[in-house]
Amino acid sequence: MCRVLRMSIGHTLLGLLESGPRHGYDLKRAFDEKFGHDRPLHYGQVYSTMSRLLKNGLVEVDGIEAGGGPERKRYAITDAGITDVERWLATPEKPEEYLQSTLYTKVVLALLTHREAADILDSQRSEHLRSMRILTDRKRRGDLADQLVCDHALFHLEADLRWLELTAARLDKLREAVAK
């Protein structure tokens, strides 16, 4: 339910390396524990990201251990990597404005094709409320980090619900506007 959208995996892995060198497996485990509750990283994603970071000079190989399987590289962040994380952390994220949402398109299309737009809004309201119940339950059982992630998602869902109510109240006016 709570998703981390458009997160920079590379920057997140770099940030995790600031506490000390780690193997790819350890980075994946730390990422999943802190950020990947709903979408754990795939090992291939970790290793391809680390390869790119290595190529770009943001990490270096701190050691290689041979074992029963493939060699295990231990990665360390470079000074350039630390600078890159600092720059990323200091750069504000662009707010998501949802100026052309799929839901808006469905409502307008329903009106244009003489279907019941109110049914679409009711159905969406029910889905939002279902998601909010799941998130609220998860928030109750979660640790502080999970509670904050769920709060973020819940606030967005609440804003969507306000939009659904406002749109339902304006359907007649919208119907007239799109019919022109």
Image (spheres, grey):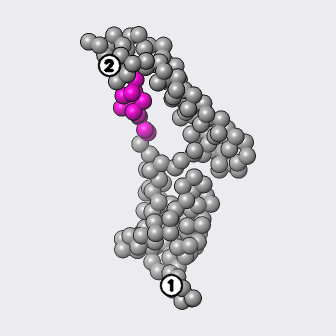
* Along the viewing direction, whichever of 144 and 67 lies nearer the viewer: 67
Q: In this view, does 107 lie above or below 91?
A: above
How many C-alpha atoms fall within 10 Å of the one at disc 2: few (<14), some, or many (≥20)? some
Q: Distance between the residues labelled 1 and 2?
A: 60 Å
Q: In this view, does 1 lie above or below 29?
A: above
Give the amino acid type for the residue marked by disc 2 in the picture: Leu
Q: Quadrant of residue 17?
A: bottom right
Q: In which quarter of the image is the C terminus?
A: top left
Q: In which quarter of the image is the N terminus?
A: top right
Residue 81 seen in the current view: no
Q: Could you tell me which residue is drawn at 43 percent across and 14 percent down?
A: 171
- Give the residue furthest to the left: 180
Q: Is residue 180 left or right of residue 9?
A: left
- Give the residue furthest to the right: 141
What residue is pinned by disc 1? Answer: 70
Label for residue 112? Answer: 2
Question: Which element type, helix, strand or loop, lies under badge 1?
Answer: loop
Give the magenta range.
Answer: 95-108
Please tell me whether residue 19 belongs to the stretch shown in magenta. no
Q: Is residue 149 above or below residue 116?
A: below
Q: Quadrant of residue 88?
A: bottom left
Q: Could you tell me which residue is drawn at 53 percent across and 47 percent down?
A: 3
Q: Position of residue 23 (x, y in %)?
A: 55, 76
The first of marks 1 and 2 along the sequence is 1
Nearer the camera: disc 1 or disc 2: 2
Q: Could you tell me which residue is drawn at 55 percent across and 32 percent down?
A: 127
Q: Where is residue 120 in the image (x, y as percent from the top left)?
A: 46, 24
Q: Is residue 101 above or below residue 32?
A: above
Give the amino acid type for the residue marked by disc 1 in the picture: Pro
Q: In which quarter of the image is residue 132?
A: top right
